[in-house]
Each structure stands twice: as structure tokens, then as C-alpha cells.
Amino acid sequence: MPKTKFQGFIFSVMMSIIMAYGMELYNVAQKMGGMSNSVFLPALIETSYMSLFVFAISNLCGNKIGKKLAFRHVSPGKDNPFFITVMISGCTVGFMCPAMSLVATVVFSGVSTQFIADWFATVVKNFPMALLWQLFFAGPLVRLLFRTIFKKQLI
């Protein structure tokens, strides 16, 4: 979708924030025993710094790895664009979820003798939410907002 580096930067910022906020809502709600109005502010505070990690990791390697994995199974120009988008999103989550779960484990639980077990548990807990959040909410929302913002430039 993005055609310039600036557009790519804006797209990446929006995706990082929306993905981080969704995941923080999910994790804070689990910590607090369920979803309630009291979850929104703590999740927003955690998003303020976790989205920076998402942005950095996705731009350093997550997006590239996701596309490389996806393009082993789909081909632009040959396959349906919808399936290409789903494959890129799914493969990117497949890398980003373990990477961000590693960061979250260090930030929220620290490094202990149970670190590997804690990290694995975090990945297993977060992966279904990350995949569904990306495929059904964050991805479509960010693409819609991006197309709206850059309507004239994308023609």
C-alpha cells in the first residue's frame, strides 16, 4: 500500500500503535480479571512505550521476515491480493508475537530461572489474540485510515 518512505513510516506508526493498544488491552484485562472500563487507561500507558518496541522490531526485521515467509506461498500479480494480504499479516504476526512476547516478558516479569517458561506461556497466551486482532481489526482499520489519509497520493 505505501508508495513512499514517508507513507511507509506513517503506515508503520499507525499499525504499531493499533497493534500495541489491542494487545495491551488484552493483557491488562487478563491481569485485572476481565474487561472493564478500568482497563483502558493502564493499557494506553503501556502502549505508549510498547508501541515503540513494536515499531522498532517490525521495521528492523519483522516486516521483512513476514513478507519473505509469505512470498514462499503466494506471488504478487498471480494470487488474489486478499490472500497475499492475509499471508503477509499472518506471517508477520508469526514472527512479531514471539519477539514482542520476549520483550513483554523481560519488561513485565523480568529475567528469572523461569524466564523461558514465562516467555513460552506469554507467546501461547498472546498468539491467538495477536493473529485475530491483526486479521480482523488492526489490519483492516489501519489500511482504511491509510487509504483515507493518502487518498490523492494513492491514485
Image (cartoon, grey):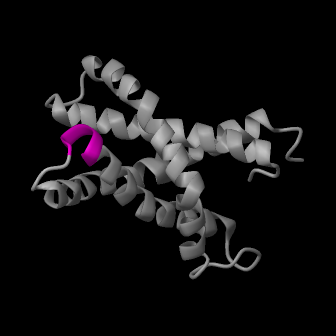
Q: Residue at x 88, y 42 (%)?
A: 153
Using the image, determine if residue 84 lies above or below residue 130. below
The x and y percentages for residue 75 are 68, 79
Q: Residue at x 67, y 36 (%)?
A: 145
Give the side of residue 116 with respect to residue 8, left or right. left
Between 61 and 142, the one lying in front of the other is 61
Using the image, determine if residue 98 lies above or below residue 20. below
The x and y percentages for residue 98 are 35, 59
Residue 143 falls in image quadrant? top right
Q: Residue at x 74, y 41 (%)?
A: 147
Give the side of residue 49 with respect to residue 63, left or right. left
The x and y percentages for residue 152 are 89, 38
Taking the magenta stretch, the answer to whether it contains residue 136 is: no
Taking the magenta stretch, the answer to whether it contains residue 107 is: yes
Give the side of residue 85 with respect to residue 49, left or right. right
Between 32 and 77, the one lying in front of the other is 32
**Magenta residues?**
105-110
Residue most toward the front? 112
Between 113 and 14, the one lying in front of the other is 113
Between 26 and 96, the one lying in front of the other is 96
Residue most toward the left? 113
- The secondary structure that dominates the magenta segment is helix
The x and y percentages for residue 116 are 18, 61
Number of callouts in the render?
0
Using the image, determine if residue 106 lies above or below residue 127. above
Residue 35 falls in image quadrant? top left
